[in-house]
Amino acid sequence: MTGALDSVAVLFTHLPVCWAALGASFEGRVECANFTLWFPQPYTDEFGRLSNGLKPPFESDLWVSMADHDPWGEVQFDAAPSEGQPKGALVSQVALKVCPEPEAGKGLVLARNVAPQINEWFGRAVVWMELWTSTNLTSEEGVEPTTMWSIQFHDPLDSSVATWFPQERLNYFPPEVAISKVILESAFSRATGAVHPSDAWVLFLSASKSEDPRLAVIEVGTAVEVALSRAIHDRLAMLAEGARNQVIIDAGGVVGLVRILEKLDGDVPKSLVKRTMDQLASPRNQAVHAAKEPSKDVLQKAFQTAVELLTKYDPLPAP
């Protein structure tokens, strides 16, 4: 590998993290580089008092060359900085120390090769963060953001600063929702291993971001149907695939699938079958066949039932 290069990843708004994550580092790997990601650290003034600003996690000539750049983020207090305890911080940029493979190139070539890969890595991590925190971190309805930040590489052996600019951005949301260090560590680890959530949870996440209630209830119903179908495939693995597919087709939808699983497992409460019919299947069918838009309350109950079914038959791995 070539020497390590300091770089900065600029988030277009803010990523809320817990206090313990400030100054912490996380390891990552993409096809043509290893890298370490650092969150900024708290800043104290000359009297040792905690400021509401954040500073770089370590010394680097790159930070000096970017003296006029946006702040690294801001601390969120319950009261005034001199009185309140910090809730966490809204991070606007993070540091990267990248160790590229020789074939990754230098300057703009390096940026064009490595930056999209790191963006895709970060996008995979964000999906896990969103599912574990039940928070929409991205502005687009698409589930996997692959272009999150701009990345500047400063190579001491190359006078140019290579910059790559993204297409998407992060949304601001309430600072009291802070992503824990455990979730960050686990999300980044899964991103390095190219581990994705199941198709059902990806569909669920997409549905939760939809601004169209009708499409949202259709998609969340589809997410559950995917999870239940997979559960039946797993339980009937001794049968030929064609036979399993026929069982699923004959079920006639999510309610029939739940009833089959009730027979196979013997532990499905009757109330869950009824809620599946009333709170998920019915509003989904009305949205599909009558183009009826569900009310806010109906949509909320549909998502609650979906979470219960997904958790039972396709549990989301813990961080």
Image (cartoon, grey):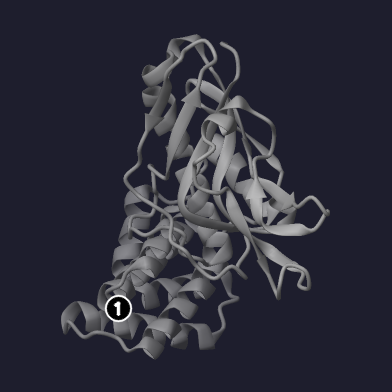
In the image: residue 83, left or right of residue 175:
right
Task: Name the residue carrying label 1.
Answer: 213
What residue appears at the point 70 percent right and 74 percent down from the top-left corner? Answer: 78
Q: Nearer the viewer, residue 310 or 265?
A: 310
Residue in view at x 76 percent, y 72 percent: 84
Q: Where is residue 73 shown, x and y percent of the image?
A: 58, 53
Q: Residue at left 30%, top 72%?
A: 211
Residue 112 placement, left or right of 31: left
Residue 225 seen in the figure: no
189 vs 171, nearest the viewer:
171
Instruction: Using the image as rendered, state which of residue 303 and residue 289 is in the foreground.
Output: 303
- Vertical arrangement, residue 162 with respect to residue 167, above or below: above
For the point 37% across and 87% down, the residue is: 296
Q: Could one spot residue 14 in this view of the protein?
A: yes
* Quarter that holds the C terminus: bottom right
Which residue is nearer to you in this view: 10 or 24? 10
Q: Position of residue 193 (x, y in %)?
A: 56, 35
Left or right, residue 29 beside residue 232: right
